[in-house]
Image (cartoon, rainbow, N blue to C red):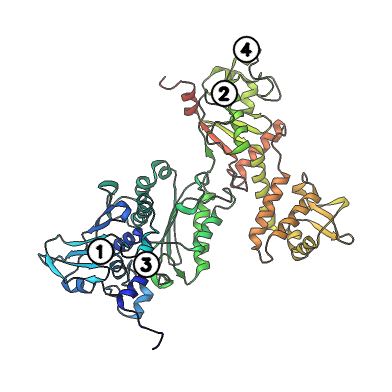
Amino acid sequence: MGKIAVLDDNMINMIAAGEVIERPASVVKELLENSIDAGATKIVIEVEQGGRDLIRIIDNGSGMDAADLALAFEPHATSKIRISDDLSGIRSMGFRGEALASIGSVAKVTVTSRTTDVIEAHTIQNDCGDKSEVRPCSGDVGTTIEVRNIFYKLPARQKFLKTPKTEMTHITEQVTRIALAHEDLDLTLNHNGREVHRLLGGQGVKERIQVLFGQSLAEDLLETSRAERGMQMRALLAKPVAARASGKYQYLFLNRRFIRDRFVLHAVKEAYRGLMEPNKYPVVFLFMQMPPEDYDVNVHPTKTEVRFDNANLIHSQVLAVIRDKLLGTNLDVGGKAPAATSFSPGHSSGFGTGHRKERIQQAMSDFFSRPASAPHQQKFSFSNTKQGEPFPQTVESSVAMSLPDMPAFEQSESWHAKQFLQVHNSYILLQSEDGFLVVDQHALHERILYEQMVKRLNEGNLPSQRLLMPHSFEVTNAQLQAYESQKELFVKLGIEVEPFGPNTLAVQTFPALLHKADPVEFVKEMLDKLVEEAADSDQERLIHEVLDMAACKAAIKAGHALSEEEMSQLLKDKDIVQRTSRCPHGRPTTLSFSLKELEKQFKRTGF
């Protein structure tokens, strides 16, 4: 007897279910897509125990008649396509005819449906492949599908289901994706008899984001759009400060279908490069429209993967629309003045993390709790008096803080002319139109240097200066090979390095912009970075990383005292140079505090 046997239809469906139906959320996704394709404008999703016990989808779509119901559970039975040419222009959500057949092979399913041209409905049941006859019954126009006890005859699959709470989280995510892509749909999601979401048809995307993700996120989103070369894009972007630890909040839609595409995701990441920390993910809602002939959605049964005819074009278009919006937006971080009683090094106030956060918090604590230095002093610092010591009782020192409507501010010529001061030789405080700003001098100078170097590189090589004496140093074989393979990069940066003996190199010239950096230490770190990178590393990314390192090395450091002229020039450059709200590593350079928040802290509201 031969070893090869033809599988029966139910076994085929069960295998297909393994690809299509991963968990209850997969059932919800497939059935919602069927309802949308049926023209439904109102859909109710009722779930019990995270979908393990029951999933009920009720829609007001076109419905199915008795003949259609009889074929509904047959494998690859579909109303969406007829011939192979239809695959190149798919406009429906589903088209393979796998969903109902797969669901029916692993659960108890009841389908009740009625079309608009008849007065009675029909129903059919399918218990893990055991189908009943189609029978007439009462029912509204549209379709109701009940899926009970998923995987109950497949204990090996059922044991991998998570808790009802976890499974419900996945279901909510699927409903969220459908809701964002179909603003016209009236959607209701209930779990164990409790309403989870109620989304009215006709809501805008921003309103839906507010319902699904919260008001604070929705209010801060930046909107942009573009139509070019047959592709339309609309994007709602969160500022870099709202970046998350995972890519969960990146929603990409192509012709109202949720997708995950590495080219598009890479473009999104690149658009935010240098504006946020490298290990963070931006929050993006991106809606793309293009002719279905320009991409293939028939790649995977879940239909979340697509293949573009021109992936490079898509990448450049997405990158451009997001990057242009970010570059044209003030991305300074807004802050809140902490309550006077809550200052301490360990208090979390959204200023950052670790030692950096503590330094800012302590500086702000000093700022709010101690009088300012006398107006005639040339250097402003809040660290000259030990905590707990009394301050000199002078007229000048009695001004604890200078708000715009306080006479002391106007009477102090030094403050009026300067309107900025340095705190702990690390931060610059300056007055803004509606409050004040706290500037991280190192982070801001990093960005300024980085942008200056990028500009110079676009015009040619970085200007360099010849060192009085060559600076020699020993290298490993790997470092020497890295130098040989990236000589062109060194030339671009204005660094001339030459062999100076066995396993020895010497720095002959060095960029003028990096005059504060140690040439040997910089070149050695650059070689280490080149060794770590693969030989075929992306040149643009490599230059970006080297310029990051260069800017950090050459920038003024925290703890460095600045003259008035140096602070003034730094702040002038902030207004001229692009993207100064973030350092090249993505950390904020500026925190913004409003006068309204200050007045609230000083109990001046309501006057």
From the viewer's perspective, is 255 left or right of 327? Answer: left
What is the CA distance from the residue labelled 2 to the residue labelled 1? Answer: 66 Å
Badge 2 amino acid: Phe
Image-quadrant location for residue 225? bottom left
Mark identifier at residue 108: 1
Front: mark 1 or 4: 1
Badge 3 amino acid: Val
Q: Is residue 418 above or below residue 174?
A: above
Q: Residue beneath label 3, please?
A: 20
What is the CA distance from the residue labelled 3 to the residue labelled 4? Answer: 77 Å
Q: Which residue is drawn at 41% across and 66% down?
A: 290
User: The residue tagged with tag 4: helix, strand or loop?
Assistant: loop
Q: Residue at x 40, y 84 (%)?
A: 4
Where is residue 500 shown, x and y percent of the image?
A: 88, 59
Q: Residue beneath label 4, please?
A: 395
Q: Residue beneath label 2, please?
A: 368
From the viewer's perspective, is 162 left or right of 283? Answer: left
User: The residue tagged with tag 1: helix, strand or loop?
Assistant: strand
Badge 4 amino acid: Val
Front: mark 1 or 3: 1
Q: In which quarter of the image is the N terminus?
A: bottom left
Front: mark 3 or 2: 3
User: The residue tagged with tag 3: helix, strand or loop?
Assistant: helix
Front: mark 2 or 1: 1
Where is residue 400 shown, x and y percent of the image?
A: 58, 19
Badge 1 amino acid: Lys
Image-quadrant location for residue 132? bottom left
Q: Work out whether mark 3 precedes mark 2 in sequence or the reverse, and give the earlier one.
A: 3
